[in-house]
Amino acid sequence: MIHVDNLTKRFADLRQGSVLALDHVSFDVQPGEIFGLLGPNGAGKTTCLRILSTVLKPSGGKALVAGHNVATEPAKVRSVIGFMSANTGLYDRMTAWEMVEYFGRLYGLPEEKLQPRLEEVFQMLQMNEIRDVLGGKMSTGMKQKVSIARTIVHDPPVLIFDEPTSGLDVLVARAVLKTIHTLRDQGKCIIFSTHIMREVEKLCDRVAIIYKGRILANGSVGELEQLYHEPDMEELFFDLISRHEALMAAERA
Amino acid sequence: MTWKNIKLVFMREVRDQLRDRRTLFMIAILPLLLYPALGIGMLYMTMLFSEQPRTVVILGADSLPEPELVNGNQFADRWFSSPTVADKLIVYTDRGTEENARQGTVDADSTSNAPITEYTVESGKLLKEAKILQEKYLHLQQLEHTEFSELMKQHQDVPGRASDATIKKAISQFTVSPKIFQARQEFSLLFAESQIQVLILIPEGFKQQIHMINQGLADGTLQIEDAPQPLRPIILQNSADEKSSIAFHRVQDAILTWERELLAERLSQAGLPATLHTPVNVQTVDLALEDQIAANLWSKLFPALMIIMAVTGAFYPAIDLGAGEKERGTMETLLISPATRTEIVLGKFFTVFVFSVSTALLNLCCLGLTGKYMVSMTGGGAFSQIGDVALPSGSSVAWLLILLIPLATLFSALCLALATFARSSKEGQYYLTPLLMVSVGMTMFCLSPAVEIKPFFSIMPVMGVALLLKGLLLDPTSTELTWYALPVLLTSFAYGLLALWWAIEQFNSEEVLFREAERFELRLWFKHLLRDKEATPSFSEAGVCFVLIMMLQFGAFKFLGDAFQHATAETRDILMLRMLIIQQLVIIGSPAAFMGLILTKSVRQTFLVRMPHPWMIGAAVVLPFVLNPLSVELSMRLSWFFPPLPEGAQEALSAMSAESTPIWLALLAFALAPALCEEIAFRGFILSGFNRTGRIGLAISLSSLTFGLMHMIPQQVFNAMLLGLVLGLLAIRSGSILPSIIFHFLFNGLEVVKARYGEAIANSSSATLFITSTEDGMHYTGLTLFLSGLIATLILKRLIFTDSATFVEHDVAADDVAGKSTDVMSPSVTQ
């Protein structure tokens, strides 16, 4: 469903000059699977997911989403994905219902299917009581619900979540994770980025550890633990990063 | 691109804006309230505002002849066109002061009726001041007089009456001595300190003299020769002090009328007709109709207001839709929807457009209605002759609507592009001021009564619309102006579309959409420039280079002009040529060369230093000869379109053909220096920078646009832009700067040779097939033009449709074996 091959992205930066945000990243994600992208802030998670959602163009390599190339068929890619991140905000002067309806229309849902689908989504996410609340007046939890509703309104086969739980309290975060789980069970192909180990252990079928634009390890949680003889995910993560740092230092020297 | 998505985005944005209190306030409430509020304010002001009466003191009032100039403490009403003016001047005279003073002391003792009014107290104070001033003034006059007569004596060769020539000479040599200078300054200060705005000194015996002359004229006994030197009243005022100056003008009006009356009396006494002093006595007839006066008013107000309001109305929604959306984090949400960038931009653009148009219209309506109401209510004042102001006619309003559309298109697209470029709403707000300043500046230029729409103005952005609207509001039925509507509308829409394209570009650029508001440090930025050098300059570096060249040119204007002023006529031509060479080297060549050396890694790639393919050199040699006739013919055909050449440019052109200058110098100044310097700058640094966009067409167009703009004079701008396209094409296709240098040199060289020897060549019999000589110089024949056109088309076609790779091998090879490139390449040319 998602096929990423040697994806590279370079940015110009005032302080450090040219920066390699993604350095030949490759992975695959299958339908009915949650793929976790685990890495600290600035590791390249957001850049990678933004390329998959076509808002950024890759500097090199190839990425296919549901068979469409993100660089050459961005419109097709956008119509088959649902994307949610901390950066995808809500309009302050629109109600929850209007907001989801608007995106449903942009995704080209015909009017006679749109209304039942909206009812269904609002029912599923239990947000009927915030239907007519303006975006500006919502709490963070409500906003997150509306964002999820917006993401799944057109029932896309591929879902991309970029740190969906950041800044949420425990209760809301738990609800979000539960929703993602439900979506997986519906057979969706899901990419999920986070820097929280617990979420990975609980949710992800497979995980890639990304650091400074490179994938350091890739496999299911069990496989990784076995491979690196480290039963604790957090230890494993630090271990990999410090090993990588040492390697880089050796290269520079 | 589907209209469905555009409509969706549009509807959402409009609804969003209408829910925003700030936008609603700016666009709807403000104009509805503003103009009536201004009207009310003006009413209040006229009610509250009463002008302070100014003080005029007349000394020697007893010597004033009849008729009565002063009536009580005012000038008599009859000397003013409007009697209310008399109230604005309080006159204090010394008439009968002595008696007054005596009475005053008596009354003060007895404290009986006849109270001491404020006026009498004030009068005493002012008269005392006036007396001192008078004394000082007479003293000053005396001083000047003695000094002048001293001088006269020095110049008087023969004793006796001074001749006119002597007096003239004396006056010309009369310089103010420090003593007098000081005295004058003291006097002026004294006058400024006093409470008097205007002081009138009537000489003693003035009345008697007037009577005497009148009498003498009437009797016929007055002899011109022994008529006494006429006494002259003196009015002292200070034109730098506004109060004094206003009072003075009023006094002057009154005295002029009074003088005319005196003259009439003198004439009637002498038995002469009253019209004696006005032998010409013209009569003026004003044919302006009421609605024309109104149209004149609207034609001044509406274009300016329309432009300013179209900008304002577009700006605030644009900021909200562009930078605001980025700031609130909804931009990315929108970008990941299936709507394409173009659809999103168009949806937003239409929203901004709707607000721009409605703001402009609402403001115009409110201003029109309030203005009409105000004028009809007050009636008097400046518009007294209008009576009732008619609102613009239906056809005027129709024109206004038609012209508003392209104007709003341009501003909406421009604002949207700027707003997208901005990182935050706050940054966006900063772009409003320059945008508004430029638009207001253009409008102000158009408001000047002397500026009318001309072919050239009709294609300028904003100005064309403003001038056309101004003309049409004055005379909506003018057929001449209607013809202008076509170019104005077409070009305005073209500018609008260009701006829209730019906005879409902004939306497609991820640097613009995702640049974060990172902390900017000048030092860091410099470091970044020098550290992260790339092979060729960046787009913005190319832009900076152009701006730098323009600024240097602007700064050099005065310098060159000054040097030129001091040159004599003989050396002027040579000096002009030298200046041109210096200008090329210093202003155009070196900035580009320095920027290239400092900011790029590869001087060779930046300035396209490599050996071109022989075919290219051939093209560069042939093209100037065939393009020159075409370009000359084109500019001749289009000469009506452009404003006439300014004087300086004509001088420069005459220097090209002047016999006195050596031909090699002319060639050096007009052909070689520009060919080297301008190519280094415009086909070297700037084109390389623009070419980084990866779009050859855009790079060539932009480089030729900058190349044209550098030439300043409209005709040359046009010519240079066209040539810039060819030059850019040559440079890009050959990957070398040499062909464009050759082309440039030959093209300009041809002009020089033609200016020098054109006449001679045309007159020789062998050339008549190609060149004819008419009264206004040398012309190419139709045959030449046809052949040139044919050859030029063939070469240009090949240049345009051949891939660059045909003539340029890969960069690596070029850098390694630059010298051998011709050998390597030759096989591929055979196709």
Image (cartoon, helix red, strand yellow):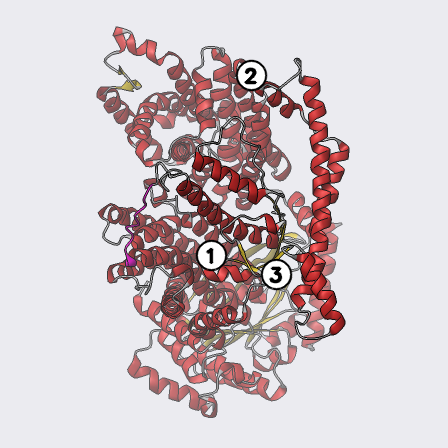
Residue A45 visible here: yes
Q: Give the extent of the magenta segment.
A: B282-291
Image location of residue B304, percent across then percent down: 42, 56
Q: Is residue B416 visible?
A: no
Do pointers 3 and 1 mark residues of a single chain? no
Q: Determine whether, in the image, residue B201 is placed left or right of residue B764.
A: right
Question: Which label was assigned to residue B680?
Answer: none
Name the chain under label 3: A
Secondary structure at badge 3 equals: strand
Q: Which mark is residue B506?
A: 1
Q: Quadrant of the C terminus of chain B?
A: top left
Disc 3 marks a residue whose amino acid type is Arg
For mark 3, what is the residue? A214
Disc 2 sits on a residue from what chain?
B
How far across and down, in percent of the image, does residue B622 sit?
35, 21
Does the magenta portion include B285? yes
- Mark 2 = which residue? B568
